[in-house]
Image: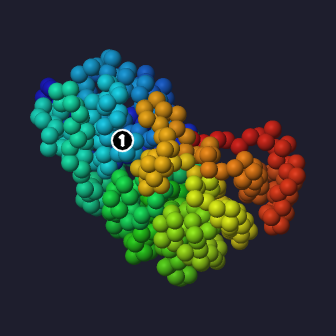
Amino acid sequence: MEKNQKHKIVLYNPEAVFYDMPLALIALGSCFDKEKYEIVIIDGRLCDGGQTVLENIEGAVCFGVTVLTGKPIQDALKVTRMVKEKCPDIPTIWGGWHTSLFPKQPLEEEPSIDITVQGQGEITFQELVDSFVSKSSLKDVKGICYREEGQIVQNAPRAISNMDELPEADYELIDVEKYFEKKGYRQFDYITSIGCFYRCTFCADPYVFGRKFSAISSERMVQTITKYQNKYGFESINFQDETFFTYRKRVVGMAEGLIDNNISIKWNATMRADQGDRLSEEDFQLLAKSGFARALVGVESGSQEMMDWLKKDIKMEQVTNTAEKCRKAGVAIQFPFIVGFPEESEKAFRNSVNFVIQLNNMSPKFRPVIFYYKPYPGTPITDELVRNGYQMPNSLKEWSQFDYVSNSGPWITEERKQEIERLKFYIRMANSKHTLSLVPKTLANFRMKRSFFKFPIEKTILDLVKPEQQLS
């Protein structure tokens, strides 16, 4: 490298249906000295990803991709192969959820992938880049798999880092305005913690992060929010944390900091029901004053029996207590539910349906969202199903076709599915804000109040006119 010439690093976010900012890539790129490194983040959702990568790849130290299980794998594979064909000597690295769950499989199948990263990637990626620049061995880099003399080597795992010791996220690495345009509103994405202390058996987080958790301090959060709100003038923040409300003091401290600094924004975050239950009504009033507009409270089931089976460590009354506190504070809630678990009885299913309706009717700001259970890799329920003969995808191609949102699994009957689809429709219509939907909205609210979903004439008509988008 010529004197004063920067090392170039090209990072890629594959195509997907959502327009959240590529926070994982921002976190990686923020770890490097701008005087020494040129960070190029390319988002396949905003441009012709493959072509843009090829225009920037020559002379790069490496090419990194963040990969979610499912359809994004298709684009990640396509672009990685293009890079290898054009520049075979440039190391290609895959990180993200898929390689955290499957460290070796991508390397076993795909010659265009050189290295996979497991778990939190900031320090790991720094050490990888240092190894590439110095042409040194990868044997001491924790948290990776790679090939050596035809064999796949898996290094020791890396413990999660203290979030306060990592560099502040540098949003100047992306064109923030393009994400506002794609979303249709000025919503800023921010992640302030990593990991989760809890043990839910349907979730891969305990497997990937070992039930560890680390978070940015409230003081630093306020500094970052103030800095970027002054720069970009966003209207709201979507906190992407798995469990944002893990520590009351941190969240209350952030809220007080926003108020003290006159930061007028709305913000949304995830909240476990037990966390909400531990907050006082005064806490909720303070949070609402700071801009807390919507919580995402994962209920999963309306049956305590199923809650215990899922090891949610939550009681049903904690859900209703949290909902009531949010209602009084004027905070909206989205309640994800999952139906169609292998062990779900008729009674448990009926309890979930009834609880969905109960929560929906508590407030016009409450919206339950119902998903069908699909076995997700790295979870105890899935491991048990596989031991009992259930066939999971076993190749990158099959995983690229995996859809854990739109389709139901084999554990739910057609009768139950029909009932759920009707319920989902009427929830959607009852919460519609479209001016042309006043009549179906009124009818939907009438049905929801009376739990009457037979003869769904409105659904038949409107599904033909405007089918609900299926998200993967």
Residue sitting at 23 percent across and 22 percent down? 89
Residue sitting at 43 percent across and 32 percent down? 395
- Is 350 displayed left or right of 315 in the figure? right
User: Is the residue 125 above or below the residue 203 in the image?
Assistant: above
Quick check: can you spot residue 382?
A: no
Residue 429 x %, y %: 77, 54
Residue that extends furthest to the front in the rendered view of this protein: 388
Q: How crowded is mark 1: few (under 14 residues within 10 Å), some or many (20 or more)?
A: some
Residue 75 x %, y %: 46, 29
Q: What residue type is labelled 1?
A: Phe
Residue 282 x %, y %: 53, 82
Q: Which quadrant is the N terminus positioned in?
A: top left
User: Is the residue 363 above or below the residue 118 in the image?
Assistant: below
Residue sitting at 25 percent across and 46 percent down? 143
Residue that extends furthest to the top in the rendered view of this protein: 86
Residue sitting at 16 percent across and 27 percent down? 149
Residue 92 x %, y %: 29, 30
* Residue labelled with disc 1: 102
Q: Which of 237 and 456 is in front in this view?
A: 456
- Is 407 displayed left or right of 210 in the figure? right
Q: Which quadrant is the C terminus positioned in?
A: top right
Quick check: can you spot residue 440?
A: yes
Q: In which quarter of the image is residue 291?
A: bottom right
